[in-house]
Image (cartoon, helix red, strand yellow):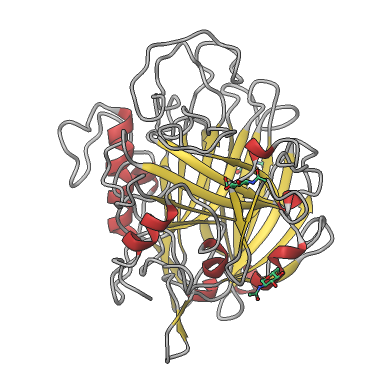
Amino acid sequence: MQVQAAAMANFSPLLLTTIWLVLVICKGVESGHSSAVGDPGMITDGLRIALEAWNFCNEVGEEAPGMGSPRAADCFHLSDSSLTHKVTESDNKLGVGKTFPGLSPKAKNNPDLYAVEKELYLGSLCEVDDTPRPWQFWMIMLKNGNYDTKSGLCPENGKKVPPFNPGRFPCFGKGCMNQPILYHQPTSLLADDIMRGGFNGTYDLGSSTGGSSSFFEVLWEKKVGTGGWVFQHKLRTSKLYPWLMLYLRADATKGFSGGYHYDTRGMLKTLPESPNFKVKLTLDVKRGGGPKSQFYLIDIGSCWKNNGAPCDGDVLTDITRYSEMIINPETPAWCSPTNIGNCPPFHITPNNTKIYRNDTSHFPYSAYHYYCAPGNAEHLEKPYSTCDPYSNPQAQELVQLLPHPIWADYGYPTKQGDGWVGDGRTWELDVGALSSRLYFYQSLLFLAAGSRYTSC
Ligand SMILES: *[C@@H]1O[C@H](CO)[C@@H](O)[C@H](O)[C@H]1NC(C)=O
Ligand SMILES: *[C@@H]1O[C@H](CO)[C@@H](O)[C@H](O)[C@H]1NC(C)=O
Ligand SMILES: *[C@@H]1O[C@H](CO)[C@@H](O)[C@H](O)[C@H]1NC(C)=O
């Protein structure tokens, strides 16, 4: 699989805590709009970018030899044509056993806890003071989809479970959940006032990054004083690593974002709240990865409990919720009139009319790739499909959309191929309005809870 894309954010407002890819803007009631991300338009010459790598259940497990903890950052200040880095290469190589300011004794030799605290430390080095609160960095996230079911490493819907026999997930055997080899090219100022930097690497330990090995790369580039940062992503799977994920995200600067059970650092100085936020970004997909490769124009993630309360880090009752539109035109709808268990219970139109999934003449089946409910939901309407219980530290819920005319009101792709190879463009997505009309389990309770967040 190979996906290559360049994404660039333009301005900003919002709702959910984690925005994958890029986003930004709150529509004020009277006052136009304001940005929810720290660097609207990605136009500041001094960049703030970090990388994190996750195993199948969003933890570290074990560090890759010589690589340190899989958290790194590239943050710098530019003045008078000189670039001053705020994070050193020895900071980036910090790994279990090595101390840094703020490290707690219990995290020192625990790879999972160590990574959490290293992210906070890198955040402190990159932090930019702002109103209403400081922000730290954009986040590149890499994830290895191998799961060694005999390792006992991943909980089931947040509950610790004993090892079980393989078969349902890719894994070549012991060690398949490894962290990657990571190379960093610190941002530098080149000829013609071009600044450029990047991360790349492989999961195939002990092999070169060429040929048939897995490969990932994120490069960023900008001309001093003009335009915005352009990010180029590449991802290639291999025989041993058939499922890899690579995201560019704007995360909340504090709190429990989707997929985490600990405090994070990020770019969203204001928490976007639906329906009043939009995301503007430019996307140019250069090459697709075949029918099994998903690509999200945007993925939003958040976390709240089934009773509507915000997440508090208790993995038994926290539930991560994601919604994403898959724009690879080779991705079919699994939701259909004969497979309504793969559809949400109902669709909500822009004028707030509910259409039940058993209403075969009106329900927009081909607008939904797949819906799955949280594994710990208690009152699901049959038939239903529950989400993979192992790939997040807590239970999860997923609403996967496909381009379809019914999404036109929100500025989203309306037909297969929109935004795909050869159709690069700038999108202004009404993510807030759309997300307020997606079904989430016990979502009415959530909306009540959501209104307690500071509004944009
Ligand atoms: C990965 O990055 C390193 C360091 O910047 C560079 O030397 C190397 O050529 C890159 N690898 C590939 C395959 O592009
Ligand atoms: C709402 O939208 C649906 C589908 O777009 C349409 O059929 C219906 O008449 C609209 N209802 C109202 C009250 O406007
Ligand atoms: C369709 O589903 C709704 C909601 O579950 C239910 O109230 C209704 O009776 C169903 N209609 C038919 C024709 O089965």
Question: Is any part of residue 199 visible from this angle?
Answer: no
Residue 373: x and y, percent? 51, 39
Question: Is any part of residue 444 visible from this angle?
Answer: yes
Residue 63: x and y, percent? 40, 27
View extreme (left): residue = 105
View extreme (top): residue = 165
Picture mark count: 0
Q: Which residue is drawn at 36% across and 54% down?
A: 87
Quadrant of the image occupied by residue 206: top right
Residue 363: x and y, percent? 71, 53
Q: In this view, does 419 lie above or below 247?
A: below
Q: In this view, does 262 lie above or below 213?
A: below
- 327 or 408, nearer to the observer: 408
Decide if residue 193 is on the left or right side of residue 32.
Answer: right
Residue 355: x and y, percent? 64, 57
Q: Which residue is drawn at 59% across and 46% down?
A: 344
Q: Residue at x 55, y 81 (%)?
A: 225
